[in-house]
Amino acid sequence: YPSIFKMKIVGKDDEEESFAPEIVSVVARSCGVTDDEVEFSKRKNGKWTSVTVHAPVKSADMLYGLYENVDKDPRVKFKF
């Protein structure tokens, strides 16, 4: 640490396609940076959307907090 942690988050998107930007915001808040500082890519396959984020984590505690915050979103089905 500090390091860039690559994480893929899969969840159910809505008609407004708000899943990816909202997940990026959760990651940014968890890492203490702005949304613009979080690199990400998104892929949609049917009703599921996968978001790969590059989270700038500064400590193990920050990483654990990131996982906890992502888990709070009920649309998230998997993360790895």
Image (cartoon, rainbow, N blue to C red):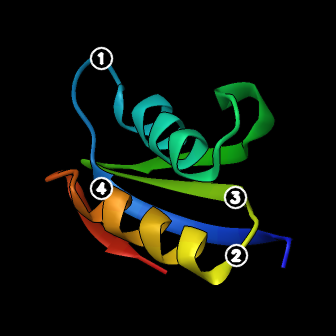
Residue nearest the observer in this picture, 58 or 67 = 58
Q: Residue 16, which numbered label?
A: 1
Query: Which numbered disc, 1 or 3, marks the residue that appears first in the sequence?
Result: 1
Q: The disc labelled 1 sits on which kind of residue?
A: Glu
Q: Quadrant where the N terminus lies? A: bottom right
Question: Label 4 belongs to which residue?
Answer: 11
Residue at position x 27%, y 39% in the image: 13
Q: Position of residue 53 (x, y in %)?
A: 65, 55
Q: Tell me if mark 3 has few (under 14), some (14-19) or many (20+) residues whose alpha carbon lies within 10 angstroms of its own.
A: many
Residue at position x 48%, y 63% in the image: 66
Q: Position of residue 65 (x, y in %)?
A: 44, 67
Where residue 68 sits, quadrant-wise, is: bottom left
CA gap, disc 2 and disc 1? 34 Å
Q: Position of residue 2 (x, y in %)?
A: 85, 71
Q: Residue 29, which numbered label?
A: none
Q: Is residue 20 left or right of residue 74?
A: right
Q: Tell me if mark 2 has few (under 14), some (14-19) or many (20+) residues whose alpha carbon lies within 10 angstroms of its own.
A: few
Query: Which numbered disc, 4 or 1, marks the residue that appears first in the sequence?
Result: 4
Residue at position x 70%, y 58% in the image: 55
Question: Label 3 belongs to which residue?
Answer: 55
Q: Are marks 2 and 1 in contact (CB under 8 Å)?
A: no
Q: Is residue 45 left or right of residue 74?
A: right
Question: Label 2 belongs to which residue?
Answer: 59
Q: Is residue 7 left or right of residue 58?
A: left
| Nearer the camera: disc 1 or disc 3 | 3
